[in-house]
Image (cartoon, rainbow, N blue to C red):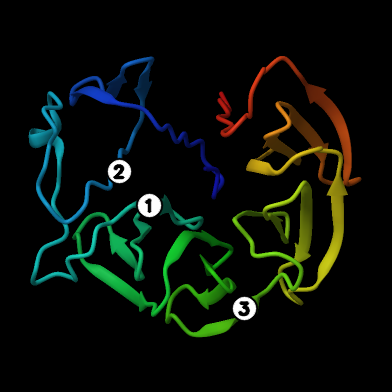
Amino acid sequence: RRRHSFPTRRSSDLVTAIDIEQKTATTTSNTFSSDFLVLALGSQNEYFGIAGLPEMAYGFKSVDEGPTETVWESFWSIHDISHFVSASKIGVRIIDIETGNETLAINFLEPISECLIYEGKIYILSQDGIHIFEELKGEKLGVLKDPEQPITHFEAAHGKIFSISNDNLIRIWDIETRKKLLELSGHTNSITDLKIYNKKLFSSSRDGTIRIWDIEIAKEIRKFEGHTDSVIHIGLDDK
């Protein structure tokens, strides 16, 4: 997911090999190159038979360093590439990449489904909304709640939050006031994923389409059809 000013790529696939010298990760369908690679494997040292992973892996989590819940998702900080935020079902951790030390921990009493860092704030999605924290000290700033439907996924860009729920609407919120600005309609079934790139919003849906929206004018500018079933995920190559 794009959270910052430098190119990134996220892929859900089966990793079969990692080449340390070439800085590549090979999956069943592609080969990816990167300057940095973060794999959230969980609290156990399982390498799943992936060639190169034991030599390349750096374990920053142990019984002494943190709780033993499984890490399931991670994102880079928007400010630089010295830290990243990882989320488990009950909390988030900010990790210093060079030292492996935890610089901030935020614990939750309810399940977490997503988190991201944007413009100095941490956004954590749980069942009752998007909880917003100050990045450096972890001070809670507020909660963005959708009174109509629980938020299932969100993106942050250009001073706004873009959210989806279990319906066919994209809702746009002002980050500072946490007030809803408008809704984007066009999909005829529930929306499954959102991506933002270059002032354009990409959405996929169970209606079998992918739509592109111009963020500045808040209008749909293109629709892609052809899938015979639900489109559940969007991946962008920003080269």
**Residue type beneath disc 1:** Ser
Say which label, 2 or 1, has the lower sequence index. 2
**Residue type beneath disc 2:** Val
Estimate how packed mark 1 is, as few (under 14), some (14 to 19) or many (20 or more) residues with alpha carbons within 10 Å: many
The residue pinned by badge 2 equals 38
Look at the numbered disc 3 and give the secondary structure of its residue: strand
Residue at 58% x, 29% y is 236
Estimate how packed mark 2 is, as few (under 14), some (14 to 19) or many (20 or more) residues with alpha carbons within 10 Å: few
The residue pinned by badge 1 equals 74
Residue at 73% x, 55% y is 158
Which of 143 and 85 lies nearest the eye of the viewer? Answer: 143
**Residue type beneath disc 3:** Val
Residue 39's spot in the image, x, y percent? Answer: 27, 42
Check if mark 2's residue and mark 3's residue have beta carbons within 8 Å: no
Residue at 37% x, 22% y is 32
Q: Is residue 147 left or right of residue 60?
A: right
Q: Is residue 231 left or right of residue 140?
A: right
3D distance between C-alphas at marks 2 and 1: 8 Å
- Residue 143, disc: 3
Residue 166's spot in the image, x, y percent? Answer: 67, 53
Look at the numbered disc 2 and give the secondary structure of its residue: loop
Residue 196, image quadrant:
top right
Residue 85's spot in the image, x, y percent? Answer: 38, 60
3D distance between C-alphas at marks 3 and 1: 21 Å
Residue 23, image quadrant:
top left
Estimate how packed mark 3 is, as few (under 14), some (14 to 19) or many (20 or more) residues with alpha carbons within 10 Å: some
Residue 23, visible in the rendered structure: no
3 or 1: mark nearer the eye: 3
Say which label, 3 or 1, has the lower sequence index. 1
